[in-house]
Amino acid sequence: MEIQTPTSSIPILFLVGYLLAGIMSTVLTVYIVRFRWQQQAARAFAAILILVSIWALGYAGRMVSPSLTMKLIWTQLAWVGIAFSPVAILAFSLIFTGRGDYLSRKRLAGLLIIPAITQLLLLTNASHQLFYQAVWLHSDDGLQLIASRGGLWFYGIHLPYSWGLYFLATVLLVQFAVTATAMYRRQATALLVGAIVPWIVNGTFLAGIRIHPELDPTPVGIAVGMAVIGAAVFRDRFLALIPVAHEQVLDELDECIFILDDADRLVDVNASGKAFLATHTSSEWVLGDRAVEIFPQRVLDEINTREETVSHREVNLEVDGSDRWYLLRIYPFLKERYTGTIVLLSDMSAIKRRQRALERKNESLEQVGHIMAHDVRNPLSVANGYLEVLENSAAIRDLPAGTQDEVESAISTIEHAHERIETIIDDVLLLAQNEHELPETETVGLERIARSAWEHVQSSALTLEVESSAAFEGNPDQLQRVFENLFRNTIEHGETATTIRIGTTPNGFYIEDDGVGSSVERTQTLFDVGVSEDVGGTGLGLAIVRDVINAHGWTIEPSTSDDGGLRFEIHGVEFRDS
């Protein structure tokens, strides 16, 4: 395709500026898509860069095209960038300054209506001349350039609308640059420079202050602006660290935040703090009121007695006849002198209620333990004594053979029931102990403790295999109870089990059997108090296992053994040299 090549210095400078603006915008877009795309603000900024690239490259194509028809095609393309870029700039400014919530899809669609109409009117301009009143070719040193005179839509709608959006975006960025921290202030300043330079250039061109009568220098200004913004991308991590308005962050917190100045006047408060004041303060309050006018007396007393260091207090406030508890933290902030106070209030009412419920539960457990230790065990001892007398009674030996067997069977059943009651008492007493705090620990051998437990519960139908004699720190009495309960669990529920196997893992040990295992649903509730598949079971055995294991600082997890049976793995054990 035939193209025009400028020969004089000014047109060459414009063409280079157009190409640089397009190339730099494209390069920055690729970089942002690759490394910053997860940020919403980065995606909005990439839209600006794409539009700027279209604008600049459209101008370059229009400049080197030889015919009016081709120049109009490139002009149409350039105006895609020119018309839509103000919307993209405003959208980015809203997101970058923490006001992205204002930019709903419906509002964005509304903002795009004017640019879309601009594109349509430009495309159909020959039939109405609303956008351009006239378009012609202008010869300059052998170079054919397009010249135009704007119409009603151009001056009456497009320019006011575009400059209005740009002005609003600039105000947002200026406001942010003034109030932002140092890092974000540099970012905002780079944005302002990158945005203002091309618009100043565009404004002077439209005002008639021109280097060349027909060549628009705006894309050259864009190239300068892109260089400034490009430096910010790599130097200040622009678009990698996106600022968020502190009001948004503070209002998302459940904690009440109050900021007082050096005269104890309220200068800032978040949404939770406003709700607190609405609940605990009867009179209307406004920013600037003194602390004595807005805070409840209990909070005010703590503020008045604050020191120059951080203080933490619990305060109790009554609301509608019920107590609410708060953790009050007071942070004086100092520079050369005392300058203010940050007051934080965290609602602890739910935690306090749970704490009191737990205290009541512990008291109930202590009462149950007392009953078990005295009011149940004492009568049980009396019953065992009479049962022993009955067993040794000569009257039983004088009974007929059949009747004697029935009586001895009944006595055996009663003995078993008494043993079961003793087990339940021991289980309940162990659960009632203060979350199984370990009274004493010593070095315990895995094999020794396992075989000691086996002697108390062994079954002729099962074989015990211990594959390790590893040693670790623990309480031997409580750990023996753990193994006894796990063994009993296999005896009572293992059904087809023939072997119980014990061994070590890299961070603990395991106990498994080769029985029928357990369903996933049952595995999830194995350690719950009261859960038992045995009709006579208490549902306390495995709950005790869990609590004793946790008291040692370990964890226990049920799973399936290689043989399909039930496997318990204890993790977090630190082995010692045996």
Image (tube, rainbow, N blue to C red):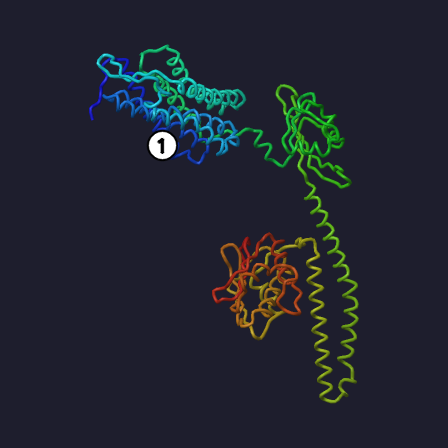
Q: Residue furthest left?
A: 2
User: Which corner quadrant holds the C terminus?
Assistant: bottom right
User: Looking at the picture, how far across and down is residue 355, in whole percent?
Assistant: 70, 47
Q: What residue is rendered at 52% in x and 29% in y?
A: 99
User: Looking at the picture, how far across and down is residue 358, in whole percent?
Assistant: 70, 50
Q: Residue furthest bottom?
A: 400
Q: Residue furthest front?
A: 127
Give 554 or 161, whichever is nearer the viewer. 161
Give 413 or 215, whichever is nearer the viewer. 215
Q: Is residue 237 visible?
A: no
Q: Is residue 46 left or right of residue 454?
A: left
- Secondary structure beneath dot 1 equals helix
Q: Amino acid at mark 1?
A: Val
Q: Residues within 10 Å of mark 1 (few under 14, many from 20)?
A: some
Q: Total number of numbered labels? A: 1
Query: Which residue is label 1 attached to?
Result: 30
Q: Residue furthest top?
A: 209
Position above or below: 248 against 178: below
User: Looking at the picture, how far across and down is residue 332, in whole percent?
Assistant: 65, 26
User: Which corner quadrant holds the N terminus?
Assistant: top left
Give 44 or 164, whichever is nearer the viewer. 164
Q: What residue is rendered at 64% in x and 34% in y?
A: 272
User: Looking at the picture, how far across and down is residue 274, in whole percent?
Assistant: 66, 31
Position above or below: 183 against 39: above
Q: Is residue 54 left or right of residue 245?
A: left
Q: Is residue 49 visible?
A: yes
Q: Quadrant of residue 490?
A: bottom right
Position above or below: 314 against 283: below
Q: What residue is rendered at 53% in x and 70% in y?
A: 499
Q: Quadrant of residue 76?
A: top left
